[in-house]
């Protein structure tokens, strides 16, 4: 009987871990969005983009997406 419940326990543990990771990632993106919202003057944004240009698109993809979404509001 115990061997039948182990896969279910493993499944629930996996689902719970994935949910926790998803919530943590969402919270991190929301915090980054709030922090980036403080860059509201054109001079601030120019400075930020100059910093981002020093790094690869892969490294800055999330930041650029958030900035683009904020710009479209």
Image (cartoon, grey):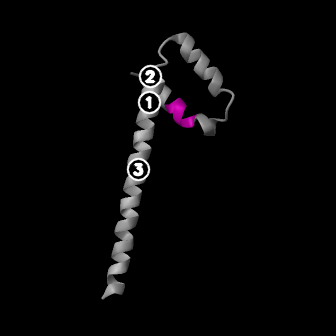
18 lies above or below 46: below
The residue singled out by tag 1 in the image is 33
How many angstroms separate mark 2 from mark 1 (CA)?
A: 6 Å
Point out the residue furthest to the front here: 2
What is the quadrant of the N terminus in the image?
A: bottom left
At 46% across and 26% down in the image, what residue appears? 35
Residue 1 vs residue 39: left or right?
Answer: left
What is the quadrant of the C terminus in the image?
A: top left
Mark 3 surroundings within 10 Å by alpha-carbon count, few (fewer than 14), some (14 through 19), many (20 or more): few
At 44% across and 37% down in the image, what residue appears? 29
In the structure shown, which secondary structural element does the residue marked by tag 2 occupy? helix
In the structure shown, which secondary structural element does the residue marked by tag 1 occupy? helix
Q: Does the image show residue 48?
A: yes
The x and y percentages for residue 12 are 34, 67
Magenta region includes residue 62: yes
* Precedes in sequence: disc 3 or disc 2: 3
Question: Can you tell which quarter of the image residue 58 is in?
Answer: top right
Point out the residue furthest to the bottom here: 1
How many angstroms separate mark 3 from mark 2 (CA)?
A: 22 Å
How many angstroms separate mark 1 from mark 3 (CA)?
A: 16 Å
In the structure shown, which secondary structural element does the residue marked by tag 3 occupy? helix
The magenta segment is 61-65
Residue 1 vs residue 43: left or right?
Answer: left
**Main secondary structure along the magenta-highlighted residues:** helix
14 lies above or below 19: below
Magenta region includes residue 64: yes
The residue singled out by tag 2 in the image is 37
Point out the residue furthest to the left here: 1
The residue singled out by tag 3 in the image is 22
């Amino acid at each position: 009987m115990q061997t039948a419940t182990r896969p279910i326990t493993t499944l629930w543990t996996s689902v719970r871990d994935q949910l926790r990771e998803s919530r943590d990632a969402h919270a991190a993106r929301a915090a980054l969005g709030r922090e980036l919202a403080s860059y509201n003057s054109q001079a601030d944004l120019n400075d930020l983009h100059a910093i981002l240009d020093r790094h690869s698109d892969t490294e800055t993809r999330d930041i650029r997406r958030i900035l683009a979404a904020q710009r479209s509001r």
